[in-house]
Amino acid sequence: MFGFACDETPELMPAPIMYAHQLGSHLTKLRKAGKAKWLRPHAKSQVSVQ
């Protein structure tokens, strides 16, 4: 959880958090479609931006 808002993204969240959320959503779609059978519901994502 991040405790601040910023104008880096339209969602007013820091870019790394938005990218991590998008990555997690995409991985969930792949898992549910059966395209990545090795993924489990507890998968996590982390994004670092320099």
Image (spheres, rainbow, N blue to C red):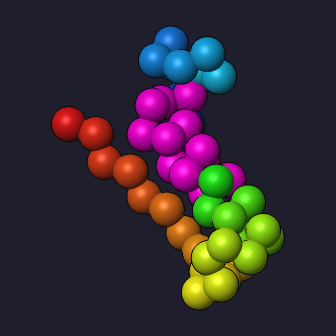
Please give the range of residues in magenta. 13-25
Residue 13 at x, y = what percent?
56, 28
Residue 42 visible? The answer is no
Residue 35 visible? The answer is yes
x 55%, y 37%: residue: 18
Q: Is 27 covered by the magenta stretch?
A: no
In this picture, is 18 found above or below 41?
above
Q: Residue furthest left?
A: 50
Relative side of 2 to 27, left or right:
left
x 53%, y 19%: residue: 9
Q: Residue furthest bottom?
A: 38
Give the prevailing secondary structure in the magenta stretch.
Answer: helix
In this picture, is 7 found above or below 46?
above
Residue 12 sits in quarter: top right
Relative side of 34 to 6, left or right:
right
Residue 47 at x, y = what percent?
38, 51
